[in-house]
Amino acid sequence: METILSVNQLTKKFGYLTAVKDLSFTIEKGNVYGILGPNGSGKSTTLGIVLNVVNRTSGSFTWFNGNTSTHEALKRVGAIIERPNFYPYMSAIQNLKLVCKIKDVSEDKIQEKLELVGLWERRQSKFKTYSLGMKQRLAIASALLNDPEILILDEPTNGLDPQGIHQIREIIKRIASQGTTILLASHLLDEVEKVCTHVVILRKGEKLYSGKVDGMMASHGFFELKADNNEILKGLLKEHNGFSEVKEESGLIIAFPKEEMSAKDLNKFLYEKGLVLSHLQKKKESLEEQFLTITERQTV
Ligand SMILES: Nc1ncnc2c1ncn2[C@@H]1O[C@H](COP(=O)(O)OP(=O)(O)OP(=O)(O)O)[C@@H](O)[C@H]1O
């Protein structure tokens, strides 16, 4: 595995507010990573730090195994962290030619990149006549002109209509299929599920989960239980030691197993302890429920 970016115990404070707290994760070549979290969870701040536009408070990050300076490394990174901004009265082609001059890269790639984002036909149109989706696609083409090893996008589909959202997601998948590593920030679970292979979930600047999107879906589910005496039931579930969390919700006991556990084995354990259940159901959570559970569970 080739490491593209390594973030180690990164912290960013804005006065009394800790926007990013002790955050660590690694980006490996060829994967599509999502930084997922609600608004204000520290996604943009994290991207800003690794792109050298926000100063960190503590911790560190290294690009490409630390073999190059951040300044040199960032030449191999394509990033869109702001709303697309080009010269309004210039065409897509003229704007991209200018970007090539600024970045000191050859103009040979312009056609390929405009075709990739589906704008070649509209290459002579002025930027100001583009829809927001087209502007975003032009920004992607522009960020790809120097064939970066990683493309970083902050909320790439924000403000777009459903068709625009679909187009951007398809383009991201196409870019990834050509071997470019992707890191995108999103508050949309659905987006991460559709586009990413890996995810880092943030809440209030802290990492709640990181790993494969598939791994997040393959949780061990949870049990809903009820007995005549729920206090004894809760005590026995704690004694069992196989649960990461036990809570009560409207008269039902909810228990999250740490590892795979069958309803039969749990029932047997409780029965042998002298407790007869009046209700037992094992449930699998959807990715969405898990995201909400993960983000909510940390508030208590
Ligand atoms: N320059 C700044 N000065 C003070 N506070 C800031 C600054 N930039 C960000 N913050 C705060 O840091 C926290 C994290 O913000 P950040 O923009 O990184 O979150 P986010 O997950 O990207 O959310 P959003 O999608 O809403 O931008 C927020 O509470 C935000 O108000």
Image (tube, grey):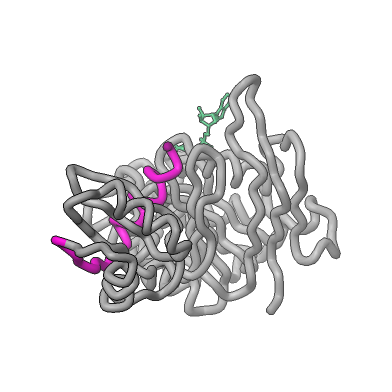
Residue 152 seen in the current view? yes
Q: In the displayed structure, would residue 121 be above or below residue 205?
A: below
Q: In the displayed structure, would residue 2 be above or below residue 221?
A: below
State the residue at coordinates (76%, 65%): 64
Q: Position of residue 275 (x, y in %)?
A: 25, 62
Q: Position of residue 207 (x, y in %)?
A: 55, 49
| Viewer-proximal residue among 77 and 110 | 77
| Viewer-proximal residue among 76 and 251 | 251
- The image shows a total of numbered marks equal to 0
Quarter where residue 119 is shown: bottom left
State the residue at coordinates (40%, 45%): 297
Q: Position of residue 34 (x, y in %)?
A: 48, 59
* Residue range of the region highlighted in magenta in the rendering: 278-300
Classify residue 36 as left or right of residue 147. Answer: left
User: Is residue 298 magenta-colored?
Assistant: yes
Classify residue 95 as left or right of residue 174. Answer: right
Classify residue 222 as left or right of residue 181. Answer: left
